[in-house]
Amino acid sequence: MPRKFLIVDDHPIIHRAIAQDLAEFDPGCQVLSASRLDDALRLLRGEQKVDLILLDLRLPDTAGVEGLVSLRRQHPDSRVVVVSAESDAPMIVRCLDLGAAGYIPKILPDPEMRSALRLVASGCAYVPPQILAGEQPLRLRGDHNAAMRSADPRRLGLTERQVDVLRLILRGLPNKLICRQLALAEGTVKVHVSAVLRALGVSNRTQAVIAASRIGLQFSD
């Protein structure tokens, strides 16, 4: 089944450029569009599943994180990546705290923008390391260099099930939805989440997304 992407942005030039990049990365994909949050929510009600939502924070009918909060609340199974002109670190961290699966500033040079879009389209996280350089340092346990070279989450010493949990954390899913996706008890998921955070050397999900982006973690499926 072809993957389905939704671009929520009211700037025609940026919208067209992102759509062209996505079609180049994934020629069989379906790209949907909306220029307002209300239009996006209405469109999503009629779609069975959207794999990735690319959201601008400034829309004609909403501003700030309101759109992200609405999309995450009403469609928690869909990954939402913010693509915004706002590029300050506190806003990026706030969006990650609210469940965004990544953050792409529109000020990125074209080659970096395309690389970032390719990453998130393939299911990975992207957070601009130069913007988050001032955030709390993140360190990996174990063989850090090997993990950096391989970008394979299994090199972090995680079990297959913990890798599954990490993948869903990076999609922004809360524990209850991870339980549903993996058919696990909530207590078991909490244990796996703790193990994932320890392996990444971080203390919360936001830092986990940042760490995964810095390492460039790649999943096999």
Image (cartoon, rainbow, N blue to C red):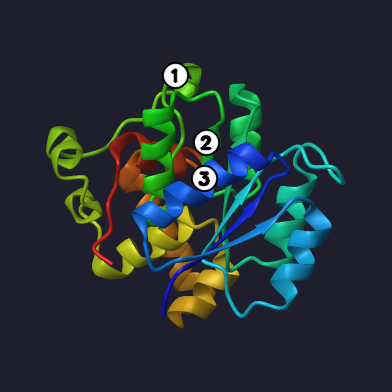
Q: Which residue is mark 1?
A: 133
Sequence order check: which comes first, mark 1 or mark 3?
A: 3
- Residue at coordinates 37% horizontally, 47% vertically from top-left? 118
Residue 204 placed where, x, y %? Answer: 51, 43
Q: Which residue is mark 3?
A: 18
Q: Secondary structure at mark 2?
A: strand
- Residue at coordinates 73% horizontally, 69% vertically from top-left? 43
Residue 27: tell me if it is visible: yes
Task: Report the label total.
Answer: 3
Name the side, left or right, on which 190 lies relative to 47.
left
Mark 3 or 2: in front is 3
Instruction: Name which residue type carries label 2.
Output: Ile
Mark 2 or 1: in front is 2
Q: Which residue is mark 2?
A: 104
- Residue at coordinates 19% horizontally, 37% vertically from top-left? 148
Q: Nearer the viewer, residue 20 or 197?
A: 20
Quadrant in which the N terminus appears: bottom left
Sequence order check: which comes first, mark 2 or mark 1?
A: 2
Instruction: Name which residue type carries label 1.
Output: Ala
Q: Secondary structure at mark 1?
A: helix
Mark 1 or 3: in front is 3
